[in-house]
Structure formats: structure tokens, C-alpha cells
Amino acid sequence: MITYSGGHRSHFREPVPPSATLRLRIRNDHHIVTSFHSADGVNWTRHGLRFETSGYNANTASDLLSLRPALFAAGHGTVTFSDFRYRAVR
């Protein structure tokens, strides 16, 4: 799994065991963005990189961009993204 920050590829590759299904979780807790992955939806592994994003807004990002999560797949085969949920912090 490869992480991108500000549109640039991270130097850190997260080793993820091959699996027919991979679940991803992205959490923004007070501007600290953390990613998790799981093959079974029960046992979650935290990604080695976390991002402090409090200063990432239209005033500091190039081309007036804002913080936006995104998923994409590359390589051979097929991918289906499903069951996307967004829950606001209460």
C-alpha cells in the first residue's frame, strides 16, 4: 500500500499481505489522519505513517487545494470499491 500526501508519493510503503478483500479505514482525529487496513474486518493494522493536517487548508496548499481523502487502484486485475461510509465526529 502506498500513501500520497499533497499529491506526492510517500517514501514509505506499507507492507500489506495479499488478500482477495482489503478493508481500509481512514480516521481524522483532531487533524491527525491515520489509516488502517484489515483483511477480515476484525483485526486492524495501523499504517506506519500518520499525517498532522491542521495547517492543510486552502491558504497553505498549492493551487488553493484542500484536504481530500481519495482511493485509487493501479496495476493488473480488477478492483471494486464498496460500502463507503463517512461518519462525522460528534
Image: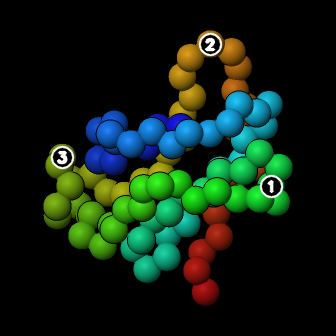
Residue nearer the viewer, 75 or 83? 75
Q: Residue furthest top?
A: 76
Residue at (69, 27) in percent of width and height: 79
Residue at (62, 13) in percent of width and height: 76
Work out how far the residue at label 1 is from the one at label 2, CA to CA, in angstroms.
24 Å
Residue at (56, 39) in percent of width and height: 15
Q: Amino acid at mark 3?
A: Asp
Quarter holding residue 71:
top right
Circle 2 or circle 3, nearest the eye: 2
Work out how far the residue at label 1 is from the one at label 3, CA to CA, in angstroms.
37 Å
SS assignment at label 2: loop
| Residue named by callout 1 | 41
Disc nearer the start of the sequence (2/3): 3
Disc nearer the start of the sequence (1/3): 1
Q: Quadrant of the C terminus?
A: bottom right
| Residue named by callout 2 | 76
Disc 2 and disc 3 in contact, CB within 8 angstroms: no
Residue at (58, 80) in percent of width and height: 89
| Residue named by callout 3 | 63
Left/right placement of residue 77 relative to residue 75 reads right
Residue nearer the viewer, 33 or 39? 39
Circle 1 or circle 3, nearest the eye: 1
SS assignment at label 1: loop
